[in-house]
Amino acid sequence: MSIILAFDTSCDDTSCAILGEGKKSNIVISQNFVHEAYGGIMPEQAARTHFENIDQATKEALKQAQCNIKDIDFIAVTIGPGLLPSLLVGVSYAKGLAYRYHLPIIPINHIEGHIFANFIENDIDFPFIVLVVSGAHTHLFLVENFGKYKLLGKTLDDAVGEAFDKVARILGLGYPGGPIIDKLSKNGNPYSFRIPKGLSQKNTLNFSFSGVKTYVKNLVEKSKDLSKTFICDVAASFQKACVDVLCEKTLLALKKYKISRLVLAGGVSANSLLRQQMSQLATENNLNLYLPSISLCTDNALMIAKAAQFRMDLATFDFDLIDAKASLNL
Ligand code: KG4
Ligand code: ZN
């Protein structure tokens, strides 16, 4: 065993974690208050804020794990996919530490991190199907083994988390939209509006969420009633349309590939209706369902450290090979 110090600065959370030899910490410094004013993420501002916070995140992660930098054996860092200015801060900082303390770096794909977040709390057998739902991804993969991923379907336009964030903006709510819509939906009627589900009923494992978002935009523009009840009803109907289609396609994939293990990953897997409907789907279809704890659904560096434990083969002292990449396939 060895101790890994990991970083994730792929988007708008500055995160540093430690994992190994009985040590564990996970520090996430959120930038939500910075981006709230814009109703979305400003990439350059996100990078500046990462730069301001990364030192503190590292110190806190070491302190929480009762570790000294000299105890560290490996550095793991998210190299992509994500916002390039944000990724560059984490990658440069990781390289700086690696030079200074002569440590190898393990480059990690952010999506692989989200998937392996599930292994922090569970031992999961292969094969399984994973639904990755985040601000940038809506992907179904068949995971045959560590590092062996088969893409089964993905969004053809917006990611589901992006749709939650955009709909929240249309409704005049804050950022990030997902948790706010989740909360407001509890006071709304999900059957108030028949929001068409993207690519539903079609024999495809791909998704589409831009139509759902446009439908809500037109609904809000045409409505004279922007009362709290209206907003909660729209939020609940929108959320239901998204969750239904996510469940529908996931079940289609499980049946097509005859898989009985299902894993959820990414920020949107924190959604209460998605967790509830997936649990029901699992019971009805006799599936083993794995859901990360809420704090491990959204971006964090502990998931990067966990993925790194399975990716030791990538460890290198050739730091020229470690580069931030905005787009990176799994
Ligand atoms: O995985 P993540 O932290 O960052 C990316 O890799 O994109 O996911 C962030 C996304 C945002 O779009 C946010 O609105 C969404 O996850 N999200 C949620 C919930 N919590 C976070 N969406 C729906 N319901 C939630 N409870
Ligand atoms: Zn993420």
Image (cartoon, grey):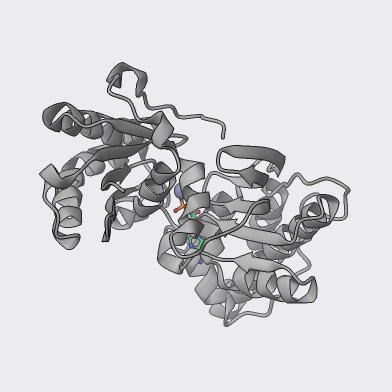
Q: Residue furthest bottom?
A: 187
Q: Residue 110, located in which quarter of the rendered image?
A: top left
Q: Between residue 125 and residue 321, name the one nearer to us.
A: 125
Above or below, 158 relative to 296: above
**Residue 21 in the figure: left or right of residue 191:** left
- The quarter of the rendered structure image containing the C terminus is top right
Locate residue 173, reporting x and y percent.
47, 64
Q: Quadrant of residue 294?
A: bottom left
Residue at left offset 13%, top offset 51%: 59
* Residue 15 seen in the current view: yes
Most foreground residue, 97 or 3: 3
Report the front residue among 324 and 219: 324
Count of all numbered marks drawn on residues in the image:
0
Q: Where residue 264 sits: x, y (%)?
A: 59, 59
User: Height in image: 205 above or below 118?
Assistant: above
Spot occupied by residue 290 in the image (x, y as percentages of width and height): 59, 65
The residue lying at 23 percent from left, 44 percent from top is: 49
Residue drawn at (59%, 51%), measured in percent from left and top?
132
Above-or-below relation of 288 to 164: below
Farthest-out residue, front: 1
Q: Is residue 224 visible?
A: no
Left/right placement of residue 321 relative to residue 101 reads right
| Quarter location, residue 219 | bottom right
